[in-house]
Image (tube, grey):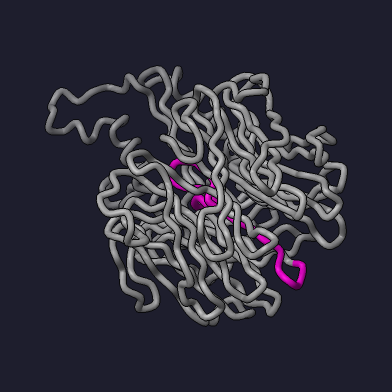
Amino acid sequence: MYQRLNYPALLPGLDAESPVRMFIAVGDDEWANPDPADAAHDLDYEAATLYNTVRRADGVAAEFRVLDGGHDWDVWRPAFVDGLKHLAATLSVTPPAGLPALLHGTAGADWAGGVAAHPDGDVTLGYAASGGVAGQPYAGGLDAVVTRLAADRRTVRWTSQFGTAANERLYGTVPLPDGGVLTAGYTRGDLDGRHPGSPADDGFVAKLTATGQRAWLTQAGDPAKADRFYAITAAPDGGAYVAGYTSGTFGGTGAGDKDAVLARIAPDGTLAWTRQFGGPGEDKAYAVAADANGVYVAGGTSGALPGATPLGGSDGWLARFTPDGARDWLTVAGGTGDDLLGGVMVTDAGQVVATGATAGDVLTVAYTAKGAQRWRTVTGGRGADAGTDVLALADGTLAVVGFTGSTLGVPAGGADVLTLRLDARGRQVAVAQYGTARDDAADPFGEENVYATVGPDGRLLVSGRTAGAPDGGAALGNGDVFLAAVDPAKGTP
């Protein structure tokens, strides 16, 4: 009877449209079966097996705790209290907002890599796929995929896929005035045909035309060390700025474990200049934005950056460079815990706004063009929350998009997509979340994997990774890419 009616045995009959939340707890000193052959039926073993089974099931959001104690009230009492606290916070008479079908990707694990909006309503998605997409040849590992969708966001105009036998990831896709797109990321192979035998990651930037042809691709980095581009923004002349990190020497002398990198790409794809900077620890750039007057780079550091006073733990940082690559100023943001900045933008008025995380909450900060802080806003709950993109809306408010593991709106699953609206002074106007019963906008390691832009109709276009199934559809595989048009007033699709 137990074998027939236990939770894993009943999973095939689960209705994914009626999501279930589970809180599983067990003691670390549960009674051990004296027969080693029957150890798989010990309660601690079975609890872990149950959790690792249901966390992979569409329609189930699960939490697992191991407490100090055995088969007694020293485990049951605190587990019951923690379970009620966790589950009660998710109860609501309002159903959660889900993700819209259709998903993009393959039967394997896929990763979001950017979203670009075009004036005619078309949308371009960038992502990394673990198989062939739309009949395109598959090189192996993870391939870079760029797909152009019509204004209905369902009709595929074209798909371009490229890669090597190793892995390629995309970390940003931006539009160009001629209808083409720029995309950037990293490769572990010889992507441009000029880096044979490279033993480590290289950053790359590619331009695709409005019809999906690859105009050029530039691969760059230290030949013997790991380099990655984590962000890209278009430059006023049709070129680009990319930002990321290097583990070696790439545009300067290495200062520590990893150094932040900013590079200027000319309109023809050539590398115009690079800047490398950092301290004795690990420094990475995660976001870049530009206007006619300067370039703004944001990231995280585990130590002391030259010219900045550490706040404690890892710090977020924001720096301004001139268009020719001279550093103007650098400032750190956060608190005494672990912090980072993962998104940045420049408003028409010249205000620089960055978003990220501080001690597990969403951090949004605004600065003048000279680096003076104007305001600081922290938003969060009991879970892990982070902002990844910040955008200006037509009504003068700001939209922060990221992920949340808290109850900031109506929770849908483990990690949900977050939309936060702030006024021009950083005061919260609205907050909402949406997603599937599993993790959305975050990868299996709990790091953000979501991108956003503003479409020509004023709605937010949000693309990210989901481990679950969308409304009225099914998952394609073990992690897919979603695209949602979000009404800024509601914060949900």
- Residue 332 visible in the shown view: yes
Residue 320 quadrant: top right
Q: Is residue 225 above or below residue 172?
A: above
Indicate the position of residue 205 as horizontal and vertical percent values. 49, 58
Picture quarter with the C terminus: bottom right
Looking at the image, residue 306 sits to the left or right of residue 145; the answer is: right
**Residue at point 33%, 66% (across, down):** 131
Indicate the position of residue 418 as horizontal and vertical percent values. 65, 50
Looking at the image, residue 137 sits to the left or right of residue 288; the answer is: left
Looking at the image, residue 310 sits to the left or right of residue 276; the answer is: right
Looking at the image, residue 314 sits to the left or right of residue 290; the answer is: left
Q: Is residue 321 magenta?
A: no
The boundaries of the magenta stretch are 437-458
Q: Nearer the viewer, residue 473 or 93?
A: 473
**Residue at point 66%, 58% (across, down):** 235
Residue 378 quadrant: top right
